[in-house]
Amino acid sequence: MSASEHRSPLHQSRSHESALLHVTGAAHYVDDLPEPPGLLHCHIVASDIAHGRLLKVDVERARQVPGVHAVLTSTDVPGDNNIGPIQHDEPLFAEGTVRFAGHAIALVVGDSIAACRKAADLVVVLAEPLHPILSIEEALAKGSFHLDPHVIARGDLVGAFAAAHLVVEAEVASGGQDHFYLETHAAMAVPSDDGALHIYSSTQHPTEIQKMAAHVLGVGAHRIVCSVPRVGGGFGGKESQASNYGAFVALASHVTGRPTKLRLNREEDMAWTGKRHPFLSQYRAAFDKDGRILGFEVTITSDGGFVTDLSGPVLDRALFHLDNAYFIPATKFLGRVAHTNLPSNTAFRGFGGPQGIVVVEDAMERAAHRLGLPPEELRRRNYYGPEPRNTAPYGQLISDPRVSAMHDRLVDEAELEIRRAEIEAYNAGSRFNKRGIGLQPLKFGISFTKSLLNQAGSLVLVYADGTVQLNHGGTEMGQGLHTKMQAVAADALGVGIDDVRVMHTATDKVPNTSPTAASSGSDLNGAAVADACATIRGRMEPIARKVLGVENEAPLTWVDGRVVGPDLESCTFAEVANRCWVEQVSLSSTGYYRTPGIAYDHAKGRGTPFFYFAYGVAITEVEVCGLTGEARMRRVDILHDVGSSLVPSIDIGQIEGGFIQGIGWLTDEEVLFWEDGRARTVGPSTYKVPSIGDVPIDFRVQMLDRAPQPGVIGGSKAVGEPPFMLAISVLSALKDAIKAYGENEVELAIPATPEAILRAVEAQRAE
Ligand code: MTE
Ligand code: LUZ
Ligand code: MOS
């Protein structure tokens, strides 16, 4: 046989490793796991006021309800009643004050959910209401903030504004977004005979669950194992915020000695968990007469909610993306986090990036209107390019500015010019419906902005029959990470894809893991998996030579379950593995990776926070109905840079899915609260997420070819978050269409719901 008959599974399209289990419903999520005997259920009693002083919490009558085993409050926490991921400012149970409507006050543990609910009604909570801060505006007025401001500044801003031909000033508000993962938060704890706990959690961050459970119980991390079968969608919502539920079941099992489970229903999940951060930003932008941006002064404020959570790094990423793909010589970016009495906002796909990018795009749109240039032309004039237009405001070198070339290619392929003319003709003949087209470029920094998190581990076990169990630190939440890791291991060991089984993520297999977040799951874990496989293959090489009877120097090819020598002599991987066992050679190894060369100095606002950038361009055409404000995406063209895709079919899905989720944020989804701070959008009947009818009629997605990324596993690039921001092209297209109703500069709110579009259309007709 020849080696060329066999192919590595890397860079080949295939379906998700769990596709069959997903579509048949056989896949186990936490709540589907077989229930251990004696399992008790948990139910949270939460504050229904947004801010108040707790005067009395009386759980005595609740404890008497038949079937109830425990009713727990902050006084039952043996360790520290605190689960803040970075700032340690988040009480698990409210203590002294309640700080948002949904703040947990007590946890009922019982035989059934029904018994728990009955008991929950008997928990007496007396609180003296305090004034709640419920908006960024009010927090600004009262000086209510989390953390210190973060400033990134460079260049001569005063000079830039003095030299400006045009100065644009505006305010941009962007809204929250519920993660709306199909699986709500869930956790189950199972005690072992020595009282140690195994926690099954729907989390993106098993190590955090382990750490927080240990912290709340006051025990060592070695007393807790957290494992994750799979996550039914996370989108950032389970990066830090699964900790509460892991800690609750840990406490419940610790106190009762029984297995316990907690699963939020949709209403609880939507009311209590944090969302994408709404942002309120003010800016001043200086342009020259050709539309080149000279200076950009921006103040951004996010709504952090009642505790800090990940608001610091989210703010940082927003600041790091206020330039998007544009070279801006002089900048002053200042960011703050408002402290309000709302659920604590958290990671969400893009992690502040989208909120930063919409600000600079607003400036681009307004400048184009005022200078009478097509917005895509103005954008093109501002892209990063060769020196000296190749450094970001925080000092990082943009070594591969690809957006210009991608822009030109997509403008050509999507026939932007021809379609502009067609749209003009259509609009001239259509009174009520108008069409518009818009282009959105993207540069997105890849790496955790908290640099130390850029590390990963793996544990690879080869059995004597040649099959492989693969453990890595990442969690599978639908994004296809396990499918990619399976391909990486199969390629690195030279075995068939079906001989690699990816195990559930677990803290007793790979310790001290980072969250599966920042789109870095495959970069970091992929390199750690390849490292372990290389170690094992290195040990197997001499044995393979013995089996094949070839020279020490002779090159061997390991592919698809066979090892092939220089004269095409071959044997199976299984034969070599078995021989290793016989000859007492170890067939398992850990692997490790850390991203080299990144660092950021927060105080100076300078550094190289990103290992590289992902790029993309999208062109979207819409049609707006001027009578209802409804809009339809007629066609979307996307050219996105994923380097050399590890599994192309998976990446196409990520690009499409990310884009549609971005459309949801920008046009459909509106997180609302009542005037007293209680959540108002708590289910699909009050909160509109995109559905199949919102998918563009003509949706053309392609990946940049021949673009391998040096230093990243398989030459690939991270893909999970970046395409989300290409959806901003819909704002540009909507503004283009709305402009056709009149002459005015378009004022369009985010989200651009039908109501907002109608308001913008009517403002055009006004003068
Ligand atoms: N895709 C699916 N299907 N489900 C998800 O929860 N999360 C997104 C993205 N794509 C998500 C998803 C987010 S927020 C991130 S950071 C990345 O996947 C995380 O996975 P990765 O690092 O393996 O790409
Ligand atoms: N930085 C980042 C982070 O860029 N993305 C993340 O998800 C993240 N999470 C925690 C800390 N920093
Ligand atoms: Mo994604 S927001 O980094 O989990």
Image (cartoon, rainbow, N blue to C red):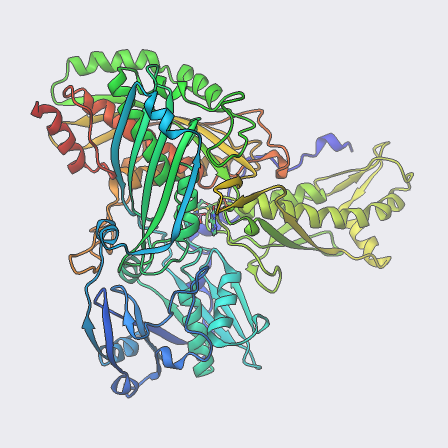
Q: Relative to 36, say whether 478 is above or below.
A: above
Viewer-side residue, 410 vs 566? 410
At horizontal 67% and vertical 34% (from top left) the residue drawn is: 7
Query: Residue 581 placed where, x, y %?
Result: 81, 58
Left or right, 495 with respect to 98, comes to: right
Q: Image quadrant for the C terminus?
A: top left
Query: Residue 76 placed where, x, y %?
Result: 39, 81
Query: Residue 464 placed where, x, y %?
Result: 76, 56
Viewer-side residue, 108 vs 330? 330
Q: Is residue 731 visible?
A: yes
Q: Is residue 619 visible?
A: no
Viewer-side residue, 521 vs 291? 291
Left or right, 646 with respect to 408, comes to: right
At horizontal 32% and vertical 15% (from top left) the residue drawn is: 289
Viewer-side residue, 732 vs 6? 732
Left or right, 101 with respect to 235, comes to: left
Q: Image quadrant for the N terminus?
A: top right
